[in-house]
Amino acid sequence: MKDSAKACIILANGQVFEGKSFGAAGCIIGEAVFTTGMNGYIETLTDPSYYGQIVTQTFPLVGNYGIIPKDFESGACHLRGYIVKEWCESPSNFRCGGTLDAYLKQQGVIGLYGIDTRALTKVLRESGVMNAMLVSGESAEAQQAFADLADSSRKAKLLERIQAYKIEHAVESVTGSATAVEEDADTVFAESAAYRFIPVKSDGTKQNDQAAAMHDGKGKKVVLWDFGAKANIRRELLKRGLSVITVPGTATAEEILALQPDGLMLSNGPGDPQENVQIIAELKKIIQTGLPIFGICLGHQILALAMGADTTKLKYGHRGANQPVKSLATGRVYISSQNHGYAVRNETLPKGAELSFVNTNDGTCEGITYTNIPAFSVQFHPEACSGPLDTSFLFDDFVKLINNRAACRDFKPRFARIDAISYFATTIRDTKKNRGEALAR
């Protein structure tokens, strides 16, 4: 039976939403955010990018297909707390391995249900993300928090504690978690094929044949620099035949280059990108070698910072599987999965960095192609699972970038860089030309 113990969330602005407890009990402080995904709660729970955050699901019923370990994005649950309108006590799915409540208890994550999650979301949308405290259960700490709410002076001190919270040491706290769920390439492709999560080409068709899907990447080695990587990034690389070596966020440029990779994958991860000073310094060294680079989410932001751009914190971020992004090269709009609270500032892009995707809701940067180094990056998640698969062709583009660079390795470095990214640069030039002709008409 569902727990009827009292629970609440206390926002840093003093607002309180009372509900009921599920999952673990206790008191925690985190950054309150919301996600609009209608499914994929397992991926949300196990995505290291949510480290330090209290996540609210806007979709009212969560947990109806239970917990499925094969869908984990990492080996643990990294968020601080979890809020839903209603959770399903009796999930129904042939892959189900347990209930949401049992999983949260096992992971020590406090849950809250029975509140108006849309009302809470509206507060966060209008005021912006803010710190909050989740209070649940009968512990002495929880009872003290409930008592503090009833006294104005003690509540003020409680709010000061909440407001002082800051997410720190984010990348180093989560790096390496995804290695706990790693599998070999054949297993990854076979399991993906069983559920039609096979590679999607740029024309929208799926590549059913494993040998064909892996042909271009065979014999090439990629280092996945793990800043809090989702396991599906590695899976998508393996599906294209690439050999993948995962290294932690603490890895140095020398350690990465010693592996003699053909490409470097910069993963997603949590926290403020500007705090990763050492990683940015090491990345600058790697950039000088001309190694092909593909960055996703935090990796996209860190690459931009290493190249001289700047980042900013968004009011309430982009979290959900329904974020529209527009390709400036083709004009096509894709629906993407996203989870980030920071963005690269468009106006700070340095020379040699071209905006490739924009968010059609607010115009923020969703992708960058670099014309002076063999590199590109996106803010959204082309490996999204559960989520739209429309942009997974970007992994094929990464393979092309690696192969183009390999084909011209004997040329002079200047020409090698140009040849390696020629298909990106040509697209950008043609797009600008077409825009000019359209304006002239």
Image: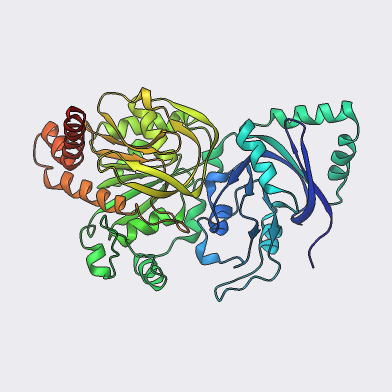
The one of 147 and 106 positioned closer to us in this rendering: 147
The total number of labels drawn is 0
The one of 305 and 151 positioned closer to us in this rendering: 151
The one of 215 and 115 positioned closer to us in this rendering: 115
Vertical relation: 339 (above or below) 434 = below
Vertical relation: 350 (above or below) 110 = above
Q: Residue at x 35, y 65 (%)?
A: 198
On-image quarter of the C terminus: top left
The one of 78 and 124 positioned closer to us in this rendering: 124
On-image quarter of the N terminus: bottom right
Position in image of residue 43 (x %, y %): 53, 56
429 displayed left or right of 395: left
**Residue lying farthest to the left in this orientation:** 411
Residue 65 placement: quadrant: bottom right
Position in image of residue 230 (x %, y %): 46, 52
Position in image of residue 367 (x %, y %): 35, 38
Vertical relation: 75 (above or below) 440 = below
**Residue lying farthest to the front in this orientation:** 441
Residue 330 placement: quadrant: top left
Q: Residue at x 24, y 69 (%)?
A: 211
**Residue lying farthest to the bottom in this orientation:** 94
Residue 87 placement: quadrant: bottom right
Examine the rendering and report whether any part of residue 136 can be seen: no
Position in image of residue 91 (x %, y %): 64, 70
20 displayed left or right of 293: right
Q: Identify the coloring.
A: rainbow
417 displayed left or right of 208: left
Q: Residue at x 28, y 42 (%)?
A: 331
Q: Residue at x 80, y 49 (%)?
A: 7
